[in-house]
Amino acid sequence: MDVAQLLGDRSRATILAMLADGPHCVCEFAIALGARQSNVSNHLARLRQAGLVRSTRHEANGRLQYYERDEAAVEAARTALSTLLR
Amino acid sequence: MDVAQLLGDRSRATILAMLADGPHCVCEFAIALGARQSNVSNHLARLRQAGLVRSTRHEANGRLQYYERDEAAVEAARTALSTLLR
DNA sequence: TTGACCCATCAGCCGCTGCTGACATATCCT
DNA sequence: AGGATATGTCAGCAGCGGCTGATGGGTCAA
C-alpha cells in the first residue's frame, strides 16, 4: 500500500506521530484515538504490513503488545514523500 | 482537506509530479493518466482548493487552461509531511 | 454569428475503506 | 485448571471518494 494513502487516515497519522517519542501499546492508541481496540489493531496491521512499525511483547507484562517505528522505513517514507513533491 | 489524503490518490500524485517540470494543461493530464476530462478537472479542483496549484489561461491559445504548482504551498506541504513523520 | 474546442461543475453510480461486534488466541494471575 | 486481560482476525455494514456522462460557460476560427 502506498505511504501517502496510509498517512491519509487521521488515526494512522496520529499513531505514527505518537510513536515518534517511543513505543506504545495498543490500548494507549485506543484511548488516545477514542477508538475500539479492534479498530486500532486493524490500523496497526496496515502499518505493520507496510513495514513502518514492528511489534514486540513487553518484558514484564507479556500480555501487552508494544509497537515501535521502524526508523529506516520511516526515513524512506519521508524521502519518498519529499521526492514526490520534488 | 489534508495534504496526505490528497497525495493518497495516484492520479493527484501523478499530476503534482508532472507539474514539477513546469505548467501543463488539463488535456495533457488526461492523456497521461488515461482518464476522462471531467475526472481530471475534479482532481485539479481539489488541488486548487488546497492551494497547491493555480490555473492561468494560455497566452496564445486562451482555450487552454494551464496549471502550475504553488511552490510555497508545496514547500509547506513537504515540511508538513516531514514533521508528521518526525 | 456559428460551430468547434477546452474546461468546470454537478448528480448518480459503484467500489473501496474504515468502523464495529463477535470470536479466537496468547499471556498472566490465582 | 480456570478466569481475566490484551490483542489479532474476520464478516458485515455504512459512508466516503473516485469515476462517468451530461450540461453549461468561455474562447477561438471561419
Image (tube, coloured by chain):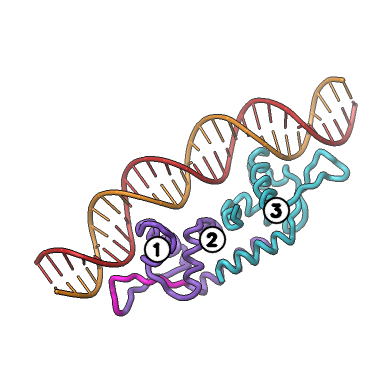
Chain colours: A purple, B cyan, C orange, D red
Which quadrant would residue B60 be assigned to in this image?
A: top right
Whole-number angstrom distance, CA of label 1 to CA of label 2: 25 Å
Q: Residue at coordinates 36% horizontally, 73% vertically from top-left?
A: A56
The relative height of residue B68 versus residue B75 in the rendered view (above or below) is above
Q: Residue at coordinates 37% horizontally, 72% vertically from top-left?
A: A66
Question: Which part of the image, by quadrant, shows the C terminus of chain B?
Answer: bottom right
**x and y percent of residue A36 in the render?**
37, 57
The relative height of residue C23 versus residue A17 in the rendered view (above or below) is above
Between B78 and A61, the one lying in front of the other is: A61
**Residue type for callout 3:** Gly
Q: Which label was assigned to residue A81?
A: none
Q: Which residue is mark 1?
A: A31
Which quadrant would residue A40 be assigned to in this image?
A: bottom left
The relative height of residue D30 versus residue A10 in the rendered view (above or below) is above
> SS for tag 3?
loop
Q: Residue at coordinates 75% horizontally, 50% vertically from top-left?
A: B54
Q: Which residues are magenta?
A: A60-69
Q: How many marks?
A: 3
Q: Of the residues under marks 1 and 2, which one precedes in the sequence? A: 2
Q: Which residue is mark 2?
A: A3
Q: Which residue is mark 3?
A: B51
> SS for tag 2?
helix
- Of badges 3 and 1, nearer the viewer stands 1
Label 1 crowding class (10 Å Cα cut-off): few <14, some 14-19, many 20+?
few
The relative height of residue A67 versus residue B5 in the rendered view (above or below) is below
**x and y percent of residue B83 in the render?**
59, 69
* Contact, mark 1 vs mark 2 (Cβ under 8 Å): no
Label 2 crowding class (10 Å Cα cut-off): few <14, some 14-19, many 20+?
some
Chain containing mark 2: A
**Residue type for callout 2:** Val
**Residue type for callout 1:** Ile
